[in-house]
């Protein structure tokens, strides 16, 4: 449930940044929370989402949607975890297919967070609140592989900073449609919300942020190509959007591919294989590999 608010910009606020303007008009909201709402496209100017840097004009019509502050009681659940690494600061798991990372509307149980709460008890960072304890980044429900979770706020801050600086090494393995003839390549194309479908992302859009994916061919098959992708940036659905944008969508992708889905696949064949980061306490470089899931290995054998 959300509450909708609407107001019109007076002349004295002309040319003010939208985030500052809203903090002046709605003093119960912090500027950082307002920026979060803007990032989530919950703030519309004349019916269109804008960036926090947008400068309002006299008579602009501002609409924003404020989610009701309801925090469901997230329960620990005894769900097995494939742990790749664990110490007092972080835990790295190999996430299975069909598992949501953190609770959200419609998914309050069976998530990775439920499993982590059972395994770690109260040893999870609290920076992202009760819905996302320990979660500093995520991968899609049907993407498998390595994911780092933080056990305390100090570790969370350190890992979040590495993500912001794009210094965390992330290598993915994927199977895509078609035969890629070149040995390797780079897709450097901004990614943002799809202009017509707000649930999707799109490459090359005007509201996009810089996104860079480096890919390399590992093996070619008759109809598909097995590739590795290294992320230089980490945008939502980045590999899926980028590979689709060059005509080689990920096999099994139900959102960004128009191909029929063979082999009874459920979701994209995308695996977060390698994860490397600087340990938040020791400063040492840690690199971990998540074994391919069985279904993925089977596909490589039968092609």
Image (cartoon, helix red, strand yellow):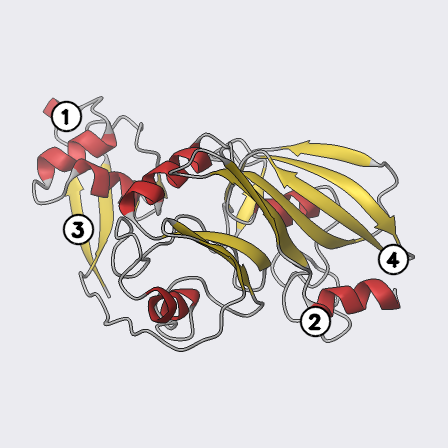
Give the mark toward the camera: 3 or 2.
2
In the rendered image, which quarter contains the C terminus? bottom right
The residues bearing labels 1 and 3 have C-alpha atoms spaced at a distance of 18 Å
- Does residue 141 sit above or below 245 in this rendering? below
Q: Could you give the CA–CA distance between mark 4 and mark 1, rounded to whole angstroms?
A: 58 Å
What element does badge 2 sit on?
loop
Dot 4 falls on a residue whose secondary structure is loop
Q: Could you tell me which secondary element the residue under label 3 belongs to?
A: strand
Residue at 13 percent of width and 44 percent of height: 29
Q: Which residue is mark 3?
A: 5
Left or right side of 81 for 122? left
In contact (CB < 8 Å): disc 4 and disc 3: no
Query: Which residue bears the numbered disc 2?
Result: 265
Up the image or down, 127 lies above or below 77; here it is above
**Camera sees residue 197:** no
Q: Is residue 184 above or below residue 295?
A: above
Query: What number of labels is visible?
Result: 4
In the picture, measured across the screen, residue 286 lies left or right of residue 298, that is: left
Please name which of the two marks, 4 or 1, marks the residue nearer to the observer.
4
Q: Which residue is mark 4?
A: 223
Q: Nearer the viewer, mark 1 or mark 2?
A: 2
Q: How far across and down, in percent of the image, does residue 18 sit? A: 24, 32
Where residue 190 is drawn, which disc sits there? none
Q: CA distance from mark 1 to mark 2?
A: 53 Å
Callout 1 secondary element: helix
Crowding near pointer 3: few (<14 within 10 Å), some, many (20+)? few
In this image, 144 relative to 207: left or right? right
């Amino acid at each position: 449930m959300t509450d909708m608010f609407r107001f019109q910009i007076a002349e004295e606020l002309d040319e003010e940044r939208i985030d500052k303007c809203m903090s002046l008009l709605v003093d119960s909201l912090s500027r950082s929370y307002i920026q979060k709402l803007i990032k989530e496209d919950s703030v519309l100017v004349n019916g269109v989402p804008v960036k926090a840097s947008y400068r309002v004009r006299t008579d602009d019509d501002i609409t924003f949607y404020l989610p009701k502050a309801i925090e469901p009681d997230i329960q620990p659940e005894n769900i097995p975890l494939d742990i790749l690494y664990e110490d007092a600061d972080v835990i790295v798991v190999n996430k299975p297919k069909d598992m949501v990372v953190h609770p959200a509307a419609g998914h309050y149980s069976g998530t990775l967070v439920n499993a982590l709460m059972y395994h770690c008890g109260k040893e999870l960072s609290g920076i992202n609140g009760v819905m996302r304890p320990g979660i500093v980044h995520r991968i899609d429900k049907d993407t498998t592989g390595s994911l780092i979770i933080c056990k305390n706020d100090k570790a969370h801050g350190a890992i979040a900073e590495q993500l912001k600086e794009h210094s965390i090494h992330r290598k993915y393995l994927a199977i895509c449609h078609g035969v890629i003839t070149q040995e390797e390549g780079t897709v450097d194309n901004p990614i943002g919300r799809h202009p017509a479908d707000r649930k999707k992302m799109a490459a090359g859009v005007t509201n996009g942020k810089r996104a860079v994916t480096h890919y390399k061919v590992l093996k070619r098959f008759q109809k598909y190509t097995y590739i590795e992708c290294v992320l230089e940036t980490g945008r939502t659905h980045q590999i899926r959007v980028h590979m689709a944008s060059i005509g080689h969508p990920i096999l099994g992708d139900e959102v960004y591919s128009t191909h029929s889905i063979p082999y009874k696949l459920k979701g994209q064949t995308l695996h977060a294989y390698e994860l490397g980061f600087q340990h938040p306490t020791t400063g040492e470089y840690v690199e971990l590999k998540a074994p391919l899931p069985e279904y993925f290995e089977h596909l490589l054998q039968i092609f």
